[in-house]
Each structure stands twice: as C-alpha cells, then as structure tokens.
Image (spheres, grey):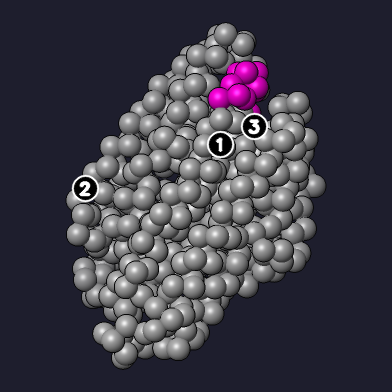
Amino acid sequence: MSIITVLLALPLLGVALIWLSQAKPQAAKYIALVVSGLVFAGSLYVWSLFDPGELGYQFEQVTEWFPAFSVSFAVGLDSLSLPLFLLTALLGFLVVIYSWNITERAPFYFGLLLLLETGVLGVFSALDFFLFYIFWEVVLIPMFFLIGIWGGERRSYASMKFLIYTHVASLIMLLATGAMYFKAADVLGYYTFLIPDITAAGFDFSFQMLVFPALLFAFCVKLPVVPLHTWLPDAHVEAPTGASVLLAGVLLKMGGYGLIRVGYMINPDAARAFTPLVVALALLSIVYGAYAAFTQDDLKKLIAYSSVSHMGFVLIGLASATQAGVFGAVYQMVAHGIISAALFMGCGVIQHNCGTRSISRLGGLYGRMPAAMTLLVLAFFASMGIPGFMGFMAEFSVMLGVYQSFGLLVLLVALGAVLAVGYYLWAFQRVAFGPLPVDMAQVRDIHWFEFVPIAVLLLLALYFGLQPDGLAAYMQGSVDMLLVPVLD
C-alpha cells in the first residue's frame, strides 16, 4: 500500500471517529487536529523522500478496482502534483487551528473539513480518470454544507449557486474524459482510465479540437475565469472563514491543475490552436478582476475579486508556452494558495472581532488591533507582488513568459499587478487608519489560534520568496518534461 493511500484514508478515519462515535465538540476538535496534523506530517515525509531528479510519478499504487470497466485505484505524485498535495495538507491543518472557536455543530463542521481534505488530496494524486472524477465530486459536498450551514445571510443562495456552477462543469468534464476513454481504446488497443496511458495515446488533431473546448470550459469555471466567475464572490462572501481559506487556497487550484494535467498535456495541439481565446480570457480576468476589486466595500469580496485577477496569471502563463511563463503559472498556484489563505484569515479576524467587513464602517484599527493589522498589511504586500514574497517570483516569471510570446500584451498583465497595489493600499488605509468608530472602542486584538496560522503562512510566503529554489527544484521536472516540449 502506497503512503499516498494512507494519507487519503486518514481524514476519512477521522470523519468516522467524529461522526460515528458522536464525539463531543471539544473531542471533535482534537480528533480533527491530530488527524490533519498526521496528514501534514505525512506529506512532509513524502516530500523528504521525493526525488526531484526522477521524471514521472513516484509513490505509485495501481490496484484493480472495477476490472470489468477498466477502473483502477491508481494514485501517485509527480513534480506538478506534489506541491499542491503539500499545500492542501498544510492548509487543512491550519484551518483546523484557525477554526478552534467554532461551537455551532462543531463535530459536523470538523468532519466536513476532513472530508474536504480527502477529496482535494485525491484530486491531486489520482492517476485514474474515474477516481479523479469521484474525488472531484466529493469536494463539492462538504463545501456545499460548509457554506449552507455556517455561511452568512445569503448562504442558501451562495451554496446552491456554487453547487450548480461547479457540478455542471464537472459533468462536462466527465463527458470529455469519457470521450477520451473510448478514443484511447482505438489507439492503444485496450480500454483504460489510467491518466498516464491516455496521455501517451496521442490523439489526432480533429479529436483534440472536440474535447479541448469542453475541458477548457470545465476547468475555467473552477479556476475561475471571467465570465464564468460569478459563483466565486458570492461563495466567498457567504462562506465561513475556514471554508473561504480552503476554497481560495486549494479548490481554485483544482481548475489550474486539471487544465494542465488533462487539457494541455493530453491535447497539446488543440491547446495551441485555442491560444488566442485563452489569452483573451486571461487578460479579461486579470484586468476585470482588479477593476472589480477596486469597487468593493466588502473587504472579503475585494479579496475574492483579487483571486479572480491573480488566477488569470495562471491561465496566461500556460498560454505563453514558454519556460518562464509555464513555470510562473505553476508557481503562482502555490503562491496564491498560501497568500490568499492568509488574506482570508486576516479578513476573518476583522469580521469576528468587529462584527463587520464593510470598509466604510471600519477605521483606526491599528490602534486597537496592532498585531492583526501588521499581519494583514504583510499579507497585502505579499499579494501585491512585493519583492521578497512568493507572489513576486510567480508574477515576474509569468510576465517574462508573456513578453517572450506576446510582446506588449504584457502591459495589460502588468496593469493587473499595478491595480493590485492600488486597491490593497486603498483598503488598508481606510481599515487601519483614521478615526476609530465609536462602537469599536472595545475591540480586542487577534486570538492565538488566529495568529499562529496567519504567521506560518506569511513566513512561508517570505521564505519561498527569498529562497524559491526550495520549491522550484520540485516543479521544474514536470515543467521541462511535460509542459514545455508539448507546448512549443
């Protein structure tokens, strides 16, 4: 049995312990903490054993599951999926700590967090399309309930919109992968759902042109890309902070990962043919997302639109088909996962302590919440792409690749980065400085269980910003072997 299988099973064991034993709220918290901590420790162990110089998948397990339908339980990691697997395990652990004050239906809440962790870890490690789809759908269930039960006033609307958008996209992805399953059998001479085998089949151009648009649509909904993004701000605004952290930190990365793994790697010729459309969608997301962030009074919605803008960097980095651009796109997924998690946690601190996220109703918080405001401004700096943080390396690499491929279009990409400086400084100036509202005179500073996760994330963003080789070495193999030769 592969260690990956063990790490996928641990959260499910935690769910069983919490729900079947009818654990008390305090016991549920400790079970979730121990289980998510073990998963994170196990992911670090996997990282320590991973050989970045070895091409292909490691820690593989391929076991027949439904042989009549050629379905296997197949898992493994390569240098594309390993960083996202680690990111998921990290955020799963930190979100449990951050949610320590959850009291309403706590056993159900923490069980859903663990179930969500299993689903996302499974997406990043599945090597069988049938298994990939199961994990992809599993993710929707706990997020639907997290938003629908612990969300804000419009939680029912937001949870239903999230489910409809993402499930419809999933069904379209299923149709496309089903078509590849049957087409691969004609090429290979046998039926298989194994992703490595289907990737090696080498589909003809006419078939790629049929399935790639469906895959592009499905994964762009998840990324998300304008104009398929409207579910995201509503989901973020209504979701509890822990769910928002996982939504921005890892669920959006499922879209980027799927687009690379299934769209670009299996259908490279069609991907190249659709480059003008992909570039247009990416630029629209970057500029529109940044502009929309400027117009928000809700701090959480501002951060949500900034995610739309920043994920546009992933899309245009892939479209550039250059070493720098593709590397920047992959690095941006991890960087945004870490930084956006810190942003949403910082926003949650304000909401929990002040009772509002409305920028127009806040002010002068630096005097009452110096530690929280210091962490928040550092998270803003990281998301702006200030040199020294991970975001800078990612965005600079993407812009370098865009310039190499598309010349002066890089100015529109740069515009998104410039606008980010504007809307973050505009928001922070109004939240942290000026007169303190009378009704917030007794506001207290950040709690320990909020401080620790944010501080850890910011330290990681700073460390991998100053020492990018710590991650780059684990990503470069897949970028070189699987992306650049395919796209050039």
Secondary element under disc 1, as helix, strand or loop, is helix
Q: Which amino acid is tagged 3?
A: Ala
Instruction: Name the disc covering residue 157, or none.
Output: 2
Give the residue number, with chain letter if any, for mark 1: 282
Would you say residue 32 is visible in this rendering? no
Res 480 → quadrant:
top right
Residue 111 colored magenta?
Answer: no
Is disc 2 surrounded by few (<14), some (14 to 19) or many (20+) residues within 10 Å?
A: some
Q: Amino acid at mark 2?
A: Tyr
The crowd level at tag 3 (other Cα within 10 Å; few <14, some 14-19, many 20+) is: many
From which residue to which does the magenta span run? 265-277
Disc 1 and disc 3: Cα gap in Å? 9 Å
Instruction: Give residue 319's mark.
Output: 3
Name the front one of labels 1 and 3: 1
The residue that appears at 64% across and 32% down in the rendered structure is: 319
**Which residue is drawn at the image coordinates 62% and 25% (left, top)?**
275
